[in-house]
Structures are given as C-alpha cells and as structure tokens.
Image (cartoon, grey):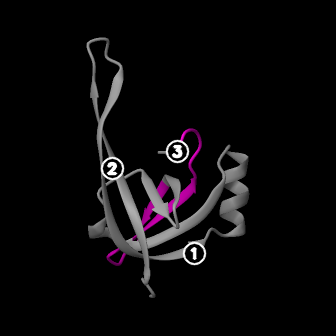
Amino acid sequence: MDRSEVITLIAQNFTQDSLNVPRELSTTERDVFAQVQNVTGLEWFEGGRNGLNPEYRFTMFKYDYDGEQIVRYKDVEYSVYRTYERRTDEIELYCEKRKGAQR
C-alpha cells in the first residue's frame, strides 16, 4: 500500500466553563503518512442520504490514530464521520469537508 501522502491529524482539547458550556482549550496537530483515496460511489450516495458529503478515505497505520476528529489535507480541513479498522494494522478514516468556520 502506498502511504506517501502526508496528512495532519488535529485534536481539539475542551473544558467546560462555570455554565457547563464547552470551551476549546487548545489544539494539537501532528503529521502522519497515509494513503488517500476518493470514497466509493456507494459511500458517497449513502452518505448523501444521511446528510453527509463524503470526499476522502485516508488509510493509515491504526497506531498513528488517536481519535482525532479533524484531518487537514492540502490545506483543507475535513471532519472524520466514521472509521473502519481492518483486520491488519490499518484504519480507514472516512471524511467530509468541514462545515462552518475554518481555523
């Protein structure tokens, strides 16, 4: 498998204020190697039926992934909407273009 693309995994760390409203404390970013593929037509169709806009599937070593919900690829941020852990030591991150304000 060709894992020659570099993607950035972004973790957001939150805390709650006195009114129990989540506040972002910080973000941490780290680069990992991954294989980048477009999602299949079926994934795109099913995602669209569920209000998602699937774009990419990033395949990487599962030990490189620590639950991050944001992926930056070619200066565009994507949200992870589902993961799939293979029987091997790989994990697939299915992502859609991030909605709302970009950092």
Q: In the figure, 51 relative to 80: above or below? A: above
Give me the residue at 69% from left, 55% from top.
46
Gap in Å between the C-alphas at discs 3 and 2?
A: 14 Å
- Mark 2 residue element: strand
- Amino acid type indicated by mark 3: Gln
- Report the span colored magenta: 82-102
- Who is closer to the viewer here, 44 or 25? 25
Mark 3 touching mark 1, by CB under 8 A?
Answer: no
Q: Quadrant of the N terminus?
A: bottom left
Q: Is residue 33 visible?
A: yes
Q: Dot 2: within a 10 Å radius of its alpha carbon, few (fewer than 14), some, or many (20 or more) residues?
A: some
Residue 82 image position (x, y, % from top left):
49, 54
Q: Earlier in the sequence, mark 1 or mark 2?
A: 2
Looking at the image, is mark 3 or mark 2 nearer the viewer?
3
Give me the residue at 51% from left, 55% from top.
77
The circle on residue 11 is 2
- Residue 40 included in the magenta stretch of the image: no
Residue most extreme to the top:
19
Give me the residue at 32% from left, 76% from top.
89
Residue 88 image position (x, y, % from top left):
35, 78
In the visual, does 39 lie left or right of 59?
right
Residue 94 image position (x, y, % from top left):
52, 61
- Amino acid type indicated by mark 1: Gln
> Image quadrant of residue 54?
bottom right
Gap in Å between the C-alphas at discs 1 and 2?
A: 22 Å
Count of marks, rendered view: 3
Looking at the image, is mark 3 or mark 1 nearer the viewer?
3
In the visual, does 56 lie left or right of 18?
right
The residue where tag 3 is placed is 102
- Who is closer to the viewer here, 93 or 20? 20
Q: Earlier in the sequence, mark 3 or mark 2?
A: 2
Gap in Å between the C-alphas at discs 3 and 1?
A: 23 Å
